Amino acid sequence: MLVKVKLIGRYKDITGKQELELEILNGDTIWHVVDVLITQYPKIEKDKKFIMVSKNNIYTTIDAKIMDGDEITLSPPVVSGG
Amino acid sequence: MDLERYQRQIIVPEFGEEGQQLLSKKQVVIIGGGGLGSNSSEILARLGVGRIDVVDDDTIELTNIHRTSIFNEEVIGSFKCQVLEEKLQKINSEVKSSGIQKRVTKENIESIVKNADIILDGTDNMQTRFLINDVSIKNGIPWIYAGVYSTVGMVMVIIPKQTPCLKCISQSIPEKTGVIPVLGNLPLTTASIECTEAIKLLLGKPLSGLIIYDIWKQQFEQINIKRNPGCSCCGNEIFEFL
């Protein structure tokens, strides 16, 4: 199935896209989506552990499963300087 | 209250005299008096917030000066909270300002924020932010997360049980990685966004979601996302940092 992935912040710069579609299996996790993106865009890897992810506009964890029709958003990790 | 001071502000349709009067009755607690907190305290004093408490136990260092407009070389070595209390009084004598020379801990945070209408984030670490998040959700006090890194600032209003909390959006706490890069004018811009959201909240106006601003690329993004019902903090009321 195809999943739509919206990209926020520097992920738009890294990929050159605001959103993209990836071919995945029903029930794959967001981890899998991030891993696929990392193989295509290795600069994303340093954020892997802390990346903000949402599914259908609800914040979720990266181990959340993706079902047909879900939309995923990837945002950069929260920043901590002051 | 001397409305002449706010003449140009009260003619802003979104704000008005009613907004000015309301703001003068509000109490803000700012946790951290560095780049974000010092700039926020100055902005809020000029806007006319009734009471501003700044909590910080650090002294001003040369490395602080590049990212705040309120400190200068003469006050290096002084406690941030004391300098801020004095400077805020000079900026606006109608504002009650108080510098609280304490490090915020799980033991003292509830007493520090108990009368706050809102808590503003002026910290420089995620541990304290998660502590603020816990006390906010537990006691029903809104707070505003703000952070900076390099050229990127982030701001998010957190209203307990209404909007996503910090725990909702953070899978884990990034490790502290030494000195954090910050372009000098970024904290002032981020503090300005944070304070605008603060006064909108205090005046009961509609709020923005997570704001991500890249000052170098001049990119501004807003993300409106719903709460995570499975969140351990705002969903299940597990306050692991408190």
Image (tube, grey):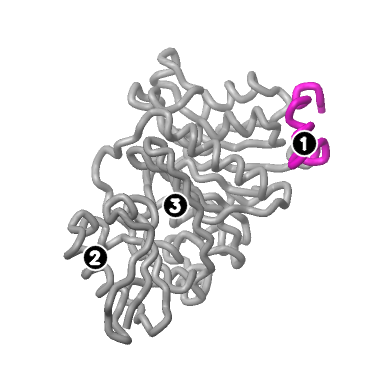
Location of mark 3 (residue): B129
Q: Secondary structure at mark 1?
A: helix
Q: Marks 1 and 3, how far apart in space?
A: 29 Å
Mark 3: which amino acid? Answer: Arg
Residue ranking furthest to the bottom: A26
Q: Marks 1 and 2, how far apart in space?
A: 49 Å
Q: Are the residues flagged by discs 2 and 3 from a single subunit?
A: no
Q: Is residue B11 magenta?
A: yes
Of circles 1 and 2, the one toward us is 2
Residue B94 in the image: state x and y as whole percent: 73, 26
Mark 2: which amino acid? Answer: Leu
Crowding around mark 1 (Cα neighbors within 10 Å: few <14, some 14 to 19, many 20+) is many
Q: Is residue B145 visible?
A: no
Q: Is there a contact, CB below 8 Å, between mark 1 and mark 2? A: no
Q: Are the residues flagged by discs 1 and 3 from a single subunit?
A: yes
Q: Secondary structure at mark 2?
A: helix
Q: Residue at x 35, y 78 (%)?
A: A64
Q: Is there a contact, CB below 8 Å, between mark 2 and mark 3? A: no
Query: Where on the picture, by quarter, is residue B76?
Result: top left
Residue B105 in the image: state x and y as whole percent: 45, 50
Location of mark 1 (residue): B20
Q: Residue at x 63, y 34 (%)?
A: B44
- Residue at mark 2: chain: A
Location of mark 2 (residue): A37
For the magenta stretch, what is the residue range?
B1-21
Looking at the rendered structure, the number of numbered marks drawn on it comes to: 3
Q: Is residue A24 visible?
A: yes
Q: Secondary structure at mark 3?
A: helix
Query: Where on the picture, by quarter, is residue A11?
Result: bottom left
